[in-house]
């Protein structure tokens, strides 16, 4: 078959996609912005045109890689939507990222990027690489040009799998780009068998480049660059960034160790060490704003500081599962493809967990936003909004409450009930507590007000009630000036904000869900449903309806209202996807999907129940065992969404609750058991909540914070328990109900965590 190798023109239709414009071209082909043939969506369309595509075996490998890539669903990996062959040319469609690559950022900042930005990129890329590594997928081409930053400042890893296929023909062919060589590991350059530590080397080299503005080795020829990777010690970043600590040098040197065995066990371990070193640098820079330039010994060569051999931690998780590609088949023969079965020790309390499958192909990723560190009890509030901020002359009669926001900005509502019961709203910087607006804005609201902030901070949306008239107020995010005031009568409203979408659900006799833009115009709306549950972090809404006495559900995108999935059964949402079951005689299988609507696995023996408005997604699917239900208790299973098999199960008795938080499941009422959701291990001793839980406030993934109400007063306490031991770490009492917004806990006018 002959290839049509010409560049596609704007308006031309290829594989059903309408070409919008050419985004870029290279040796492997071109990437276009292209309009989806059916959905109101523009995708990135990659069309491969390399001469090697005449080789049928290359196409087969490309198809295999595309199938594997399509199973990946991670917030820091560009999503693959579809693939095929048209006019003899293989193609892929991917999520189109509105932003720029880190290579372009370096062109704008040739002396390196801010340490805080590099720290965030390192953590995001490590999570993405470890996640992909759980599927034995290696990137093999991690570099600044393959990391995109979208308009929400989220780092996204792209070009997954393509470099691996291209490298099958050899790594040192004539014409190989020096830019790729600059970040390649020694074993990759040698053509040896690779595992995830090769990607770690490339990530460390990339971080070096982001900090300094140039790759670690800058030879003038490919041969010189290769020689440096094989034998030259990693230079010090402090030559270019003297404000950084020596710890950064040591961590990068270990991440780029010539011998893979001397590197960190996972990319996550490398990024965690680097994050702490850069965090310390940032903290010191905050205290010492002006300082003499550090004197750097230019003969200093960092060497990896490895722990003593007796204390080297056993490599687990991704490192264990991402075996070198060449030995996976042999291991499968040895193990017989089976999974380890184990039962936890009976601690003499609560449910007993039974694991049924290894978690080796899963990367730990907590559900939701993690709190700031809960390690130490605060000596007092981080900051407090004083009455003077509101211009109040009666501070004793001023009630202040945090009513919405995110990790960067928080909206507060103040009520001066002595002076005419007046209300003000103010946007506050979450880190400093300083006002983000010229002045508080007086608004016609009441104490039931709840607010949200769009991701770009272009708008603050609040639902409120005044004289039994519910309404949606939209305020300008920069000034607080009112943009829209939309009445809804006397029906209750629920507000959710996701990205730039403001979603209001009207709980009337005929429920309606409406998505508004920041200017108050309607983006889309939906009627004729039983219930709709918005999952803001996942960017989807699940809509349940009744048809002929049976349930049905749709999964819609929040930004456009476009349908991702429809089923006559029920849907349950978890952090990275959703589970679907269609009841039928003899039981129903449960199908698992990524958030892009791509099927990942099918399981059996579970029941999926309709979602409710207060549902919070767990890190993994938590489903009820359909064969173990009674009036007194129920058995629940945590399921691997990539295989459909049970990881472990637990028992819940009548009156108990199951509350997902981060990487944990909290089960119980006043006596609580905390489970690691990935392993089923009951962590420490049972937690005893003195006055009962008012709310689970969140976790930093090592401790869990609860709100504890005193039934005899207006006081509340923030109580923090160590997740590993069950011991109480600290308790902080104050007035006002604590609320979690973004990565902080607020109580009244105070930020506590």
Image (cartoon, grey):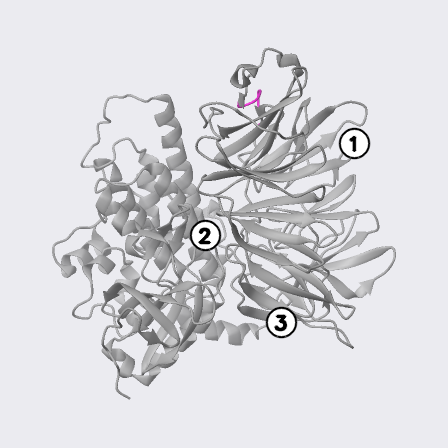
User: Which residue has dot 1 on it?
Assistant: 691
Q: Residue 188: image x %, image y %?
A: 29, 63
The residue indicated by pointer 3 is 602
Percent position of residue 92, x then y: 38, 71
What residue is rendered at 78% in x and 40% in y?
A: 671
Residue 345 is situated, as x and y percent measured from the top left of the image, at 73, 52
On screen, residue 99 versus residue 180, left or right, reads right
* Residue stretch in magenta: 376-382
- Spot the residue most to the bottom: 1
Whether residue 381 is in magenta: the answer is yes
The image quarter containing residue 610 is bottom right
Distance of label 2 from label 1 (alpha carbons): 38 Å
Sooner in the amino-acid sequence: mark 3 or mark 2: 2
Main SS type for the magenta part? Answer: loop
Residue that appears at 80% across and 27% down: 711
Q: Is residue 9 visible?
A: yes
Q: For the C terminus, which image quadrant?
A: top right
Badge 2 element: helix
- Say which label, 2 or 1, has the lower sequence index: 2
Tell us which disc is closer to us: 3 or 2: 3
Of 156 and 463, which appears nearest the observer?
A: 463
């Amino acid at each position: 078959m002959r290839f049509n190798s010409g560049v596609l023109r704007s308006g031309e239709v290829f594989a059903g996609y309408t070409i919008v414009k050419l985004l870029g071209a290279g040796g492997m082909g071109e990437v276009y912005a292209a309009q989806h043939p059916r959905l109101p969506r523009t995708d990135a369309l990659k069309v491969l045109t390399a001469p090697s595509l005449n080789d049928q075996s290359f196409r087969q490998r490309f198809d295999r890689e595309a199938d594997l890539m399509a199973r990946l669903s991670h917030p820091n990996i560009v999503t693959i939507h579809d693939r095929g062959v048209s006019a003899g040319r293989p193609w892929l469609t991917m999520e189109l990222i509105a932003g720029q690559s880190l290579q372009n950022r370096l062109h704008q900042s040739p002396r390196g990027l801010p340490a805080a930005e590099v720290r965030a990129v390192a953590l995001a890329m490590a999570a993405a690489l470890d996640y992909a590594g759980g599927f034995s997928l290696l990137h093999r081409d991690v570099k600044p040009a393959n990391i995109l930053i979208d308009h929400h400042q989220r780092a996204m890893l792209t070009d997954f799998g393509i470099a691996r296929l291209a490298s099958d023909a050899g790594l040192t062919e004539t014409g190989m780009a020096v830019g790729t060589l600059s970040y390649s590991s020694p074993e990759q350059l040698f053509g040896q068998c690779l595992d995830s530590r090769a990607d770690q080397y490339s990530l460390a080299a990339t971080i070096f480049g982001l900090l300094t503005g140039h790759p670690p080795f800058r030879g003038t020829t490919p041969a010189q660059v290769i020689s440096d990777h094989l034998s030259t010690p990693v230079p010090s970043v402090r030559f270019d960034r003297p404000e950084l600590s020596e710890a950064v040098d040591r961590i990068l040197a270990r991440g780029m160790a010539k011998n893979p065995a001397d590197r960190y066990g996972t990319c996550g371990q490398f990024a965690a060490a680097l994050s702490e070193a850069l965090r310390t640098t940032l903290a010191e820079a905050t205290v010492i704003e002006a300082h003499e330039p550090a004197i750097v010994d230019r003969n200093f060569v960092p060497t990896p500081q490895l722990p003593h051999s007796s204390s080297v931690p056993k490599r687990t998780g991704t490192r264990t599962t991402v075996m070198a590609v060449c030995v996976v088949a042999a291991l499968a023969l040895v193990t017989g493809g089976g999974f380890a079965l184990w039962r936890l020790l009976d601690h003499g309390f609560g449910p007993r967990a039974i694991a049924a499958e290894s978690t080796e192909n899963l990367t730990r990723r907590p559900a939701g936003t993690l709190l700031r560190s809960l390690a130490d009890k605060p000596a007092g509030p981080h900051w407090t909004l004083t009455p003077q901020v509101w211009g109040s002359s009666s501070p004793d009669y001023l009630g202040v409450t945090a009513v919405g926001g995110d990790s960067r900005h928080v909206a507060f509502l103040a009520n001066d009930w002595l002076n005419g019961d007046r209300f003000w709203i103010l946007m506050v910087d979450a880190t400093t507590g300083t006002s983000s607006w010229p002045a508080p804005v007086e608004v016609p609201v009441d104490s039931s007000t709840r607010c949200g902030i769009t991701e770009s901070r272009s708008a603050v949306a609040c639902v409120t009630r005044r004289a039994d008239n519910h309404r949606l107020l939209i305020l300008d995010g920069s000034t607080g000036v009112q943009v829209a005031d939309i009445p809804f009568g006397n029906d209750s409203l629920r507000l959710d904000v996701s990205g730039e979408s403001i979603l209001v659900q009207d709980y009337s006799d005929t429920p309606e869900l409406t998505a508004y833009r920041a200017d108050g115009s309607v983006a889309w709306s939906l009627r004729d449903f039983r219930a709709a549950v918005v999952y803001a972090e996942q960017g989807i809404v699940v809509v349940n309806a009744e048809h002929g006495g049976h349930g049905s559900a749709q999964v819609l995108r929040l930004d456009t209202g476009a349908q991702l999935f429809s089923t006559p059964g029920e849907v349950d949402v978890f952090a990275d996807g959703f589970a679907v079951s269609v009841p039928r005689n003899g039981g129903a299988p449960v199908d698992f999907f990524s958030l892009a609507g791509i099927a990942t696995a099918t399981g059996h023996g579970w029941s999926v129940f309709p979602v409710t408005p207060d549902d919070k997604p767990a890190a993994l699917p938590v489903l009820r065992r359909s064969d173990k239900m009674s009036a007194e208790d129920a058995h629940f299973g945590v399921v691997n969404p990539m295989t459909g098999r049970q990881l472990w199960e637990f028992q819940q008795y009548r009156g108990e609750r199951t509350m997902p938080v981060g990487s944990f499941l909290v089960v119980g009422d006043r006596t609580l058991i905390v489970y690691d959701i990935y392993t089923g291990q009951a962590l420490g001793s049972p937690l005893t909540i003195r006055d009962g839980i008012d709310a689970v406030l969140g976790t930093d993934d090592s401790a869990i914070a609860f709100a504890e109400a005193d039934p005899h007063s207006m006081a509340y306490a923030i109580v923090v328990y160590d997740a590993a031991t069950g011991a109480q770490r600290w308790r902080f009492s104050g007035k006002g109900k604590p609320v979690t917004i973004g990565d902080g806990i607020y109580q009244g006018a105070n930020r506590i965590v």
